Image: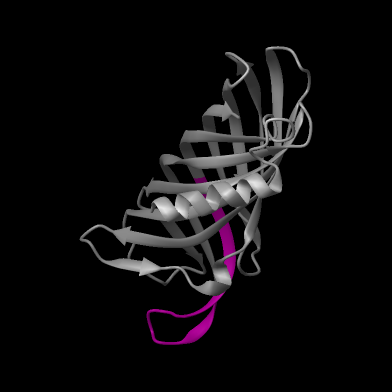
Amino acid sequence: MKTLIGTFLIGMSSLGLLNPTFGQSKLSVSVVASPNFHYLNTKFTEILSDGSGAIKPFDVHVKQNGSGYSAGVAVNYWFSKQWSVATGIMLNSVDYQEPTVTTNPNGVQFLTIASTIRSFQVPLTVNYRTSTKRLSPYLSAGALTSLHSVRIFEGGSKSSNTVEKIRPHPMMGVGLDYQLNRHVSLIAQPTFVYFLPYKKAISYKNYQMGLQAQLLYRF
């Protein structure tokens, strides 16, 4: 472990990120946490069997709400006192209520059950402090990618996502950055993530809203 840490520090130093004359204000790390609310409302066409055994197309309408949290760590690289790019790793957990599923025409019965989805997510954002004052508006825009997710159903059964469902989703945040001193800042911002559809839909709404808090340390 000591060898690994030493190698990491040597690499950072070679890039100038730990050099007092160059990197002191270039790199920051933060602890990130947020409560989240998730909403899904989509309608799509599916080929299904009706009660008589006939196979035909049905319009399927699904609505579902969920709430949970995300927590993790992030690293910022500062191009200036106001502009930075950030990435990190987050654990996201959402408890979903039992979905509402209807079809048109009627005749298909679905087994609906509450579930929890846990996933590791990687955000990549460009961030902007609108001023160099101690308290400043803080804007973020970028993408969020779920690397792996597991859905846990009531009763304990599980299902995992597939590789083709791993894709970036647009995200944004608008909030405030308060600098406690030259090294430590507190950032709070409402966030919004729009999850792109995986297949063609008649109508589609799938998004997550959060209230993100960051405790940031700048080297």
| Position of residue 150 measured from the top left corner of the image (x, y, whole percent) | 38, 62
Colouring scheme applied when the structure was drawn:
one colour
The stretch drawn in magenta includes residue 145 = no
| Position of residue 152 measured from the top left corner of the image (x, y, whole percent) | 31, 59
Q: Residue at x 71, y 20 (%)?
A: 137
Quarter that holds the N terminus: bottom left
The front one of 2 and 218 is: 2
**With respect to residue 119, does 217 lie above or below?**
above
Q: Is residue 206 visible?
A: no
Q: Residue furthest left?
A: 155
The front one of 44 and 155 is: 155
| Position of residue 123 measured from the top left corner of the image (x, y, whole percent) | 60, 48
Q: Would residue 13 appear left or right of 151 to someone viewing this image?
A: right
Magenta segment boundaries in residue numbering: 39-57
Q: Would residue 124 appear left or right of 96 to someone viewing this image?
A: right
Q: Residue at x 26, y 66 (%)?
A: 157
Question: Which image quarter: residue 199?
Answer: bottom right
| Position of residue 88 measured from the top left corner of the image (x, y, whole percent) | 55, 47
Question: Which image quarter: residue 219?
Answer: top right
Q: Residue at x 59, y 30 (%)?
A: 190
Q: Would residue 115 appear left or right of 64 to someone viewing this image?
A: left
Q: Residue furthest bottom?
A: 54
